[in-house]
Image (tube, rainbow, N blue to C red):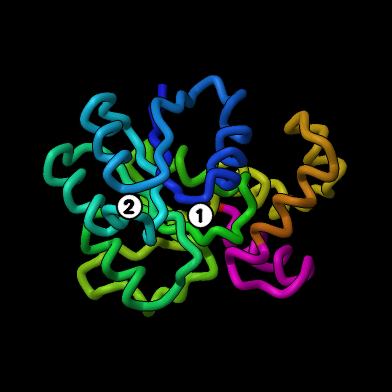
Amino acid sequence: MITIAIAEDHQSLIDGVELLLRYEEEISIVGMANDGEELLNIVRRKQPKVVLTDIRMPKIDGIAACKIIKKEFPHTKIIAFSMFDQEDAVRQMIEAGASGYLLKNSPLEEVLTAIQQIAKGETYFDAAIDPSLFSKDAKQPSKKQLLSKSEREILKLIGQGKTSSEIAAIRFNSVSTVETHRKNIIRKLGLHGKGELLRYAIEKKYDF
């Protein structure tokens, strides 16, 4: 079970994430906070496996909260969830101990993917973040790490020449779900269209 605490000063965004995760059997939300002080209280009481936190929050910001959490609970994994993709914000969260960084304009489905990967000890960084923003000693995500398990499986099937309809049948998904995964893969890998995705999948099919 992945226990998670969420900190965000906009309640509507917390509600959206909570709705996304509510029916995930492997995930349990143990607390939701609107400021950093409340987040620390939740973490100290519940000791969640993963924390999803905004950076700019009242009382204690996400960077300071991240440092405190990692000092008191080093095994807790932290994901920054922010509107800011500036160099300072990204680097400060990584240096504070965050294992992932997501932008708030990412699809909510990507939040779930990030939580699942980071809970397994991996890193997860939004594909929109320029890798050059990472500090030299920070662990930069590989293209493989940018993709979720589902996306890697779909990429393999694309490399085998499967159509979206065939992939949907194999994975018991809808065609629209497969098409959404295709678009996300293209965006994360910085590709341009389905033709480039197919070429990439054929070249890399044994790497995923």
Label 1: how many Cα within 10 Å (few below 14, some 14–19, many 20+): few
Above or below, 101 relative to 17: below
| Residue drawn at x 17%, y 37% as measured from the top left | 73
The rendered magenta stretch, by its main secondary structure, is classed as helix
- Toward the viewer: 166 or 26? 26
Would you say 32 lies left or right of 194 here?
left
Measuring from the top left, give residue 142's x and y in whole percent: 42, 62
Residue density around tag 2, few if under 14, some if 14–19, many if 20 or more, within 10 Å = many
Element on which disc 2 rests:
loop
What residue is drawn where x is 36% and y is 41%? 51
Residue at (37, 56) in percent of width and height: 57
Q: Residue 23: which disc?
A: none
Circle 2 sits on which residue? 99
Q: Position of residue 120 (x, y in %)?
A: 37, 37
| Left or right: where 205 falls relative to 53 | right
Q: Which residues are magenta?
A: 186-205
Q: Residue at x 77, y 29 (%)?
A: 172
| Amino acid at the residue labelled 2 | Ser
Label 2, label 1: how many angstroms apart (C-alpha)?
23 Å
